[in-house]
């Protein structure tokens, strides 16, 4: 299960880290002025993740395309990850 870890940071700010099942850091949020602001950001992320899409900025060779993007949309099977059902 992925979890959000809320932490005090330098300068009196509060931030969060997204941690995966294996304990590895997946993402880090920016600093917020207080715990309430950090928790509000986590809540917005948790609410919005269900509507998230993948934006592919790579070409077939793995080289990023300058300025070009392709939105995958709601059907996550379009990204070619076999065995994973569409979301």
Image (cartoon, helix red, strand yellow):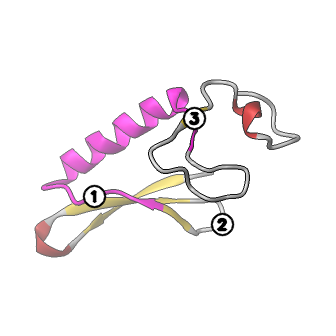
Dot 2 crowding, Cα within 10 Å, few <14, some 14–19, many 20+: few
Dot 3 crowding, Cα within 10 Å, few <14, some 14–19, many 20+: few
Q: From the viewer's side, name the closer residue of 63 and 1.
A: 63
Q: Which residue is mark 2?
A: 22
Q: Residue at x 57, y 52 (%)?
A: 2
Looking at the rendered structure, the secondary structure element under dot 3 is: strand
Would you say 77 lies left or right of 71 here? right
Q: Which residue is mark 3?
A: 70
Would you say 72 lies left or right of 31 here? right
Looking at the rendered structure, the secondary structure element under dot 1 is: loop
x, y percent for residue 22: 66, 66
Looking at the rendered structure, the secondary structure element under dot 2 is: loop
Can you name the residue that lies furthest to the front here?
66
Q: In this rendering, which labeled residue sits more in front, label 3 or label 2?
A: 3
Q: Which residue is mark 1?
A: 30
Is 30 magenta? The answer is yes
Q: Residue at x 51, y 26 (%)?
A: 51
């Amino acid at each position: 299960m992925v979890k959000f870890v809320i932490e005090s940071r330098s300068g009196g700010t509060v931030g969060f880290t997204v941690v995966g099942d294996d304990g590895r850091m997946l993402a880090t949020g920016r600093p917020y002025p207080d715990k309430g602001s950090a928790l509000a950001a986590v809540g917005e992320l948790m609410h919005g993740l269900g509507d998230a899409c993948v934006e592919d900025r790579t070409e077939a060779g793995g080289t990023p395309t300058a300025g070009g993007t392709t939105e995958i949309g709601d059907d996550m099977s379009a990204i070619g990850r076999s065995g994973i059902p569409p979301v």
